[in-house]
Image: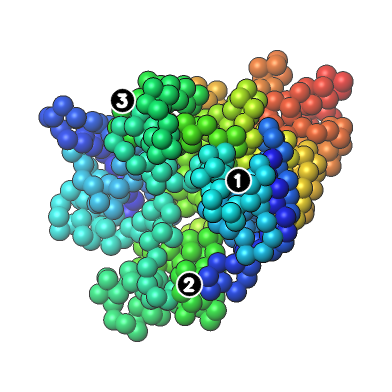
């Protein structure tokens, strides 16, 4: 069953001078197995929004239903939350145990699994994220590189076998190869586990490449929702909102402003090359 | 001028050297970008520039002062200021202007001059309107601008940005890069930009690529980004527009050129389309 968000509003410190509406009147459905991207600049309400998906925050208006569980209800929330794995920004700062395996198995143990099962699941999760258990299980988390730490943190969540994987800026702070590798890992996890991926990212290139649908948040509201083709055909609008757009979309826009007709679905380099080739051959 | 001669450095207990024979010179008024994958040694190198770390072997000289000379440490830090990655770790007071004045106050600068320096520093980063605000209420990008102002208030000749854009959103990153470029061009500050975002390297005069604690490549952005395959082998990449440029050149759709940015690419493609 999907995640259904209806008229979600969250107001911080209501009825005080500091009252602040962080998200307002958001209605959307995240389908099973979908790769769902969320973009928006700092302060647009993205973080507040995703914290409602695992019940860390509760709506002050409207509702969030995860797999049929109403997240406003205390008992149902516990069941819904168990299905949602949340990976926060810079999760590698949260590694604390003495070995990588202990760290990865912290979550599953906390779920009440016995030691042996927690270990089995953790080893499996390490394999899935590309950390060879033979090499890494007994290492100290402090010996890992930036990308390896990120993988270890991801494995800790995967070991809990979530149905929905919520990732807040999973590639932040990694080098270009690290970024590519983590994104490839997320895509392969989605195939292997059949889970829904909800990814917040500042990198328009990454979102354009991976997401099936994209939600654009602005000022606490859902500004736009659609496929990458639909969203990035509105590059001019995104830029005027102070949002980023893929660089290739910007290039296409600049050419339009110089009087050339460039189709609206050109926002990746591959598409740009085939468009220009066609155009040069036609002439 | 900063002169680095054959420095080596190992962190306690580490098997590999973080820096392994690095030599380079950074000239006055230069804009140098240092790139490299996670663990390549670039941040260790940054911390050598104002005596936060001292080399095990070799030497670092800042305007003629050796960083190993403890008596010169304070003078060196007046010359070279560092902006770090996490803005939250760099803010120490509850009011923006006090935070920016913290550095000069510690150096014993007279109060009237501190007020002037704080004003100028906040002006330079476009945050004058926030002088009386509480830093913790600001966005990450705004906090980072306050951190830059705090370094500027010390009036250093050299500004080092140690992955100062890594935790910011695209708007915040853009603002930091623009401020760095402006301080370099208009105020003549030497800028050392350490980053993993290849797009941020385009503004530099010179790029230094680090790998395994050594300098692997050096050249202008145009030169470096012609060597995409070597960069990828070092876990780096070329900017998106350079990737497109290479793809279009390979197809023979545009002539060989040095375009790096969106507007330069638009120019090249325009010319090709008009000629066609």
Residue highlighted by disc 2:
A126
Q: How far is the residue under mark 1 from the one under mark 3?
A: 31 Å
**Position in image of residue B153 (x %, y %):** 47, 31
Q: Quadrant of the N terminus of chain B?
A: top right
> Which-is-in-front pick, marks 3 and 2?
3
**Position in image of residue A252 (x %, y %):** 66, 27
Residue farthest to the bottom, as pictured:
A116
Q: Residue at x 37, y 26 (%)?
A: B111
Q: How far is the residue under mark 3 from the one under mark 2?
A: 49 Å
To which quarter of the image does residue B55 belong?
bottom right
From what the image shows, is residue A36 above or below residue B132?
below
Say if labels 3 and 2 share a chain: no
Mark linked to residue B194: 1
To which quarter of the image does residue A153 belong?
bottom left
**Position in image of residue B141 (x %, y %):** 44, 35
- Label 3 resides on the chain identified as B
Q: Is residue A264 visible?
A: no
Q: Are marks 1 and 3 in contact (CB under 8 Å)?
A: no
Camera-side residue of B17 and A184: B17
> Which-is-in-front pick, marks 1 and 2?
1
Judge left or right: residue A137 versus residue A51: right
């Amino acid at each position: 069953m999907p995640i259904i968000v209806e008229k979600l509003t969250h107001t911080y410190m209501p009825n005080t001078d500091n009252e602040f509406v962080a998200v307002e009147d958001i209605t959307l459905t995240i389908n099973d197995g979908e790769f769902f991207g969320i973009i928006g600049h700092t302060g647009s309400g993205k973080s507040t929004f995703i914290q409602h998906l695992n019940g860390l925050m509760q709506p002050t208006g409207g509702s969030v239903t995860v797999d049929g569980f109403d997240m406003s209800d205390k008992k149902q929330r516990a069941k819904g939350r168990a299905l949602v794995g949340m990976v926060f920004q810079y999760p590698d700062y949260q590694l604390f145990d003495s070995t990588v395996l202990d760290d990865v198995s912290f979550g599953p143990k906390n779920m009440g699994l016995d030691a042996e099962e927690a270990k089995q699941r953790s080893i499996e999760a390490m394999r899935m994220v590309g950390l060879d258990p033979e090499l890494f299980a007994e290492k100290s988390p402090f010996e890992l590189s930036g990308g390896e730490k990120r993988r270890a943190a991801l494995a800790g969540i995967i070991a809990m076998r979530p149905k929905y994987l919520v990732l807040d800026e999973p590639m932040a702070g990694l080098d270009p190869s690290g970024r590519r590798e983590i994104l490839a890992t997320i895509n392969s996890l989605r195939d292997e586990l059949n889970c829904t991926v909800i990814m917040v990212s500042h990198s328009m290139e990454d979102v354009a490449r991976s997401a099936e649908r994209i939600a654009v948040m602005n000022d606490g509201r859902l500004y736009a929702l659609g496929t990458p083709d639909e969203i990035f055909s509105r590059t001019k609008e995104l830029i005027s909102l102070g949002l980023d757009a893929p660089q290739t979309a910007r290039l296409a826009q600049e050419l339009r402003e110089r009087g050339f007709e460039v189709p609206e679905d050109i926002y990746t380099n591959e598409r740009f090359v085939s468009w220009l080739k066609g155009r040069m051959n036609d002439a | 001028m900063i002169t680095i001669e054959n420095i080596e450095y190992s962190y306690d207990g580490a098997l590999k050297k973080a820096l392994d024979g690095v030599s380079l010179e950074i000239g006055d008024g230069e804009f140098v970008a240092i790139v490299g994958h996670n663990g390549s040694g670039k941040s260790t190198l940054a911390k050598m520039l104002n005596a936060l770390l001292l080399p095990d072997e070799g030497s670092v000289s800042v305007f003629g002062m050796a960083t190993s000379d403890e008596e010169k440490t304070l003078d060196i830090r007046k010359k070279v200021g560092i902006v770090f990655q996490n803005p939250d770790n760099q803010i120490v007071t509850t009011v923006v202007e006090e935070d920016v004045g913290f550095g000069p106050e510690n150096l014993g600068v007279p109060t009237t001059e501190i007020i002037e320096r704080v004003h100028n520093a906040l002006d330079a980063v476009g945050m004058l309107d926030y002088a009386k605000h509480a830093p913790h209420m600001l966005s990450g990008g705004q906090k980072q601008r306050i951190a830059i102002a705090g370094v500027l208030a010390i009036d250093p000749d050299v500004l080092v940005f140690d992955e100062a854009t890594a935790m910011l959103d695209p708007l915040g990153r853009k603002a930091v890069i623009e401020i760095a470029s402006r301080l370099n061009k208009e105020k003549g500050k030497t800028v050392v930009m350490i980053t993993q975002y290849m797009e941020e390297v385009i503004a530099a005069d010179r790029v230094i690529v680090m790998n395994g604690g050594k300098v692997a490549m050096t050249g202008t952005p145009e030169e470096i980004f012609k060597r995409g395959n070597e960069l990828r082998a070092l876990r780096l990449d070329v900017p998106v527009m350079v990737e497109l440029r290479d793809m279009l050149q390979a197809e023979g759709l545009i002539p060989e050129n040095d375009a790096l940015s969106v507007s330069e690419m638009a120019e090249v493609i325009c010319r090709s389309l008009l000629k066609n």
